[in-house]
Amino acid sequence: MIQLYVPGASVVHRLGAGAKLLALAVAALVLSLVSPDPWGIAAALAGVTALYLLARLPLRVLAAEIWRLRWLMVVLGGALLVFVGPLAAWISTGRVVTIVLLASLLTLTTRMGDLIDVLRRLIAPARRFGVDPESVTMTIALTITMIPVVAGFASQVREAQRARGAARSGLHGVVPLMVRTLRHADDVADALAARGAV
């Protein structure tokens, strides 16, 4: 899950947004192209843990990030375990979890404005092909900020269902979650239109 910025003064926080984005891209590329052994994946996960500690983020933050990935690990790991075996399941699932945890660390230690500035500069050359960098970066920013908002809506829906004594079923929560999400999207669209952003 993509999380929002947590203020801090660590080395990781002070590192430039561009450098962190580049490091994430390189790490994702290496993990995707290189076929590590099980110990390599364990070392990568240990390295991610060390980076969270270097960022002076409490271990509970890392634990919360891992907990948010529980269904990804269960579904992906379970499917791979059944179809290709435990070794491939560990390597592939560990690879994905490592990349997602690194992406979460990026958003936890980097202000959204700094990330958007870097993305705008990266997309700027595409202007000659008719791409509007401002629109693209705004879309990316809205997408990133909407993820925790929708997660919050899902949590509110579950709490409301528990308060009414409703059975815990994901299907019963889909409609109210969609209604809240679409209503929020309309509010955001109205706000952007009022400011002349769209």
Image: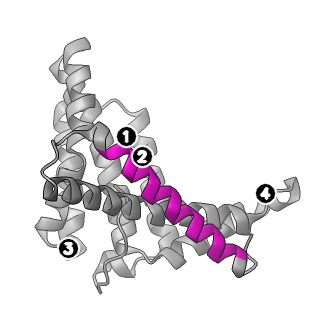
Please state which amino acid type lies under the numbered disc 1: Leu
Start-end of magenta stretch = 173-193
Say whether disc 2 or disc 4 marks the residue closer to the N-terminus.
Answer: 2
Disc on res. 23:
none
Does the segment drawn in magenta span residue 69? Answer: no
Give the residue pinned by disc 4: 126
Please state which amino acid type lies under the numbered disc 3: Leu
Disc on res. 31:
1
SS at mark 2 in the image: helix
Q: Toward the viewer: 28 or 130?
A: 130
Left or right of 82, for residue 103: right
Q: Tell me which residue sits at (43%, 59%) in the image.
A: 180
Indicate the quadrant containing the C terminus: top left, top right, bottom left or bottom right: bottom right
Q: Do callouts 4 and 1 mark residues in contact (Cβ within 8 Å)?
A: no
Q: Nearer the viewer, mark 2 or mark 4?
A: 4
Say whether disc 4 or disc 3 marks the residue closer to the N-terminus.
Answer: 3
Q: Nearer the viewer, mark 2 or mark 3?
A: 3
